[in-house]
Image (cartoon, rainbow, N blue to C red):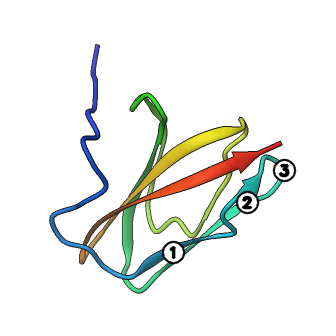
């Protein structure tokens, strides 16, 4: 069993990054606009459970279930965690 605890939205080093659109519908993709090369993206549900991880310079992401999520983008220049709402 592996648990990841998210205790806030502050990260050690932030870089410019944005999720568009937000909120998003389940049938839409989220565009990740970042000014740095992305190493990987993690998606956590509102309970802090890791529900998706995508490696590489990810610029588009799809979340299939409605709810509130935290998207953590790890890039060359730092880490950024953002909240996204997914609607039906």
Tag shown at residue 29: 2
Q: Which of 23 and 43 is in front in this view?
A: 23
Which of the marked residues, 1 or 3, is nearer the chain's N terminus?
Answer: 1
Mark 1 lies on a secondary structure that is: strand
67 relative to 15 in the view: left or right: right
Mark pair 2, 3: CA separation: 7 Å
Mark 3 lies on a secondary structure that is: loop
Mark pair 1, 3: CA separation: 19 Å
When the figure is inspected, residue 55 is found, relative to residue 33, above or below; the finding is: above
- Give the percent coordinates (x, y) of residue 44: 45, 39
- Give the residue displayed 41% in from the left and 86% down from the top: 35
Tag shown at residue 18: 1
Q: Residue 88: which quarter of the image?
A: top right
Mark pair 2, 1: CA separation: 13 Å
Tag shown at residue 27: 3
The image quadrant where one finds the N terminus is: top left
């Amino acid at each position: 069993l592996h648990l990841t605890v998210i205790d806030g939205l502050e990260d050690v080093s932030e870089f410019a990054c944005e999720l568009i659109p937000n909120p998003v519908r389940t049938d839409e993709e989220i565009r990740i606009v970042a000014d740095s090369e992305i190493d990987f993206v993690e998606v956590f549900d509102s309970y802090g459970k890791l529900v998706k991880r995508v490696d590489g310079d990810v610029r588009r992401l799809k979340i299939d279930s409605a709810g509130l999520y935290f998207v953590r983008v790890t890039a060359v220049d730092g880490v950024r965690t953002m909240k996204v709402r997914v609607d039906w």
